[in-house]
Image (tube, rainbow, N blue to C red):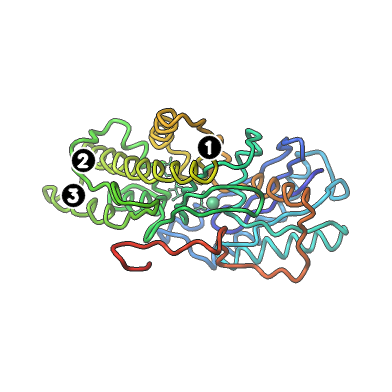
């Protein structure tokens, strides 16, 4: 089975060709970073237009690299949500158009399911496994029990962790996206210099919170002598921030491991996915935790952690194998939880 995957839900336009033998035959990504840079964040209208401009060319290039034509495809998958609706519409309409013209099945993939199933593309991991999904828009702990079968153990009550990295970077005068720059700055920083909070550490449950940490970073910056930050200050704050994030996530994940094992006595794998999974410090922290808990730890290669078309094509293959096809009436979804029955995150008795 060979499937074309299309991803347009945020600021990357991507098209990939993947087969059911887990081979990525082509994987094309165009980042819109430069388009949004003058505005200091993603502008939805600019994103949608950039997807329109780039997508056809990327699909052609992906098929060319895979050495196939539309006729050799067995299906077309596109991110159907959640995400910026203008972009999702572009991807879904394009996929429907190809599917209708070529008589192919169309699959609408949940973007989060794309991230969640990537470890099965890269490592052929069996269900069930525990997943930590950390990106610019999401921060969740989920038990992946099967295709379309997710139990959400925890989520963030305020910011996603990638968002926290991006905001911390901004306060430190680093560019967007902030994650990679904070990580680079932290490399020779002193993580003990700024005593930042470890949000939610020690609390029951598996929910996250990062807005207090963001505020603490701002206070740390403001407490420094007036004038531009020195490279040492930036490095030390970045390292202290990254350490706090790592400890907070490790604490939440430890609770999730217990919940996972309660539900699946033989559960033996922890997977991390999403853009923040590219962070080397976080990988190290999770690796150490998994080893201490006797779990196998899997992290897809960085290129497959950030948004890409291969994960959408693969999720499409997983769905097609089960006969899960969508029809032309599918409407793009700005919101689309993986586990609609999950309770809302609760903090200090207040529902978020
Ligand atoms: O999954 P992704 O590509 O897009 C979303 O679906 O959100 O994740 C992007 C997020 C951004 O917030 C970015 O700052 C963060 O992932 N990120 C990182 C690193 N690389 C990307 N955060 C921390 N360390 C990194 N090395
Ligand atoms: Zn993503």
Instruction: Say if disc 2 is inside 8 Å of ligand 1.
Output: no
Residue at image location 67% in from the left, 56% down from the top = 109
Q: Pointer 1: residues within 10 angstroms few (<14), some, or many (20+)?
A: some
* Disc 2: which residue: 233
Residue found farthest to the left = 225
For numbered disc 1, what is the local secondary structure?
helix
Q: Tell me if residue 108 comes above or below residue 16 in the rendering.
A: below
Sequence-wise, which precedes: disc 3 or disc 2?
Answer: 3
Residue 271: give its label.
Answer: none
Residue at image location 44% in from the left, 52% down from the top = 139
Instruction: Say if disc 1 is inside 8 Å of ligand 1.
Output: yes
Sequence-wise, which precedes: disc 3 or disc 1?
Answer: 3
User: Left of 259 or right of it: where is 212?
Assistant: left
Q: Position of residue 114 (x, y in %)?
A: 62, 50
Quarter of the figure with residue 184:
top left
Between disc 3 and disc 2, the foreground one is 3
* Disc 1: which residue: 302
Residue 220: give its label.
Answer: 3
Sequence-wise, which precedes: disc 2 or disc 1?
Answer: 2
């Amino acid at each position: 089975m060979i499937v074309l995957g299309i991803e347009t839900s945020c600021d990357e336009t991507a098209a990939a060709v993947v087969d059911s033998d887990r081979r990525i035959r082509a994987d094309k990504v165009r980042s819109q970073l430069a388009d949004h840079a003058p505005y200091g964040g993603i502008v939805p209208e600019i994103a949608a237009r950039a997807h329109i401009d780039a997508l056809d060319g990327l699909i052609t290039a992906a098929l060319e690299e895979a050495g196939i034509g539309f006729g050799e495809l067995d299906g077309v998958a596109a991110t159907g949500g959640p995400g910026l609706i203008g972009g999702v519409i572009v991807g879904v309409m394009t996929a429907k158009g190809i599917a209708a013209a070529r008589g192919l099945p169309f699959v609408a993939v949940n973007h989060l399911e794309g991230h969640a199933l990537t470890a099965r593309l890269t490592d052929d991991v069996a269900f069930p496994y525990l997943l930590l999904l950390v990106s610019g828009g999401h921060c969740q702990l989920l038990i992946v029990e099967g295709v379309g079968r997710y139990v959400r153990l925890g989520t963030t009550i305020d910011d996603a962790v990638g968002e926290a990295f991006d905001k911390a970077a901004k306060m430190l005068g680093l560019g967007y996206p902030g994650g990679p720059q904070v990580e680079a700055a932290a490399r020779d920083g002193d993580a003990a210099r700024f005593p930042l909070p470890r949000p939610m550490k020690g609390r029951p449950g598996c929910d996250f919170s990062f807005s207090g940490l963001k505020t603490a970073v701002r206070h740390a910056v403001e407490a420094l002598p007036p004038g531009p930050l020195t490279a040492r200050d930036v490095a030390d704050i970045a390292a202290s921030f990254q350490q706090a994030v790592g400890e907070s996530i490790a604490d939440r994940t430890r609770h999730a491991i217990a919940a996972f094992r309660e539900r699946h006595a033989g559960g033996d794998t922890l997977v991390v996915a999403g853009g923040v999974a590219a962070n080397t410090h976080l990988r190290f922290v999770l690796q150490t935790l998994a080893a201490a808990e006797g779990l196998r730890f899997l992290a897809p290669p960085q290129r497959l952690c950030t948004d890409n078309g291969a994960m959408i094509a693969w999720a499409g293959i997983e769905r097609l194998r089960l006969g899960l096809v969508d029809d032309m009436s599918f409407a793009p979804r700005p919101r689309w939880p993986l586990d609609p029955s999950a309770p809302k995150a609760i903090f200090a008795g207040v529902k978020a």
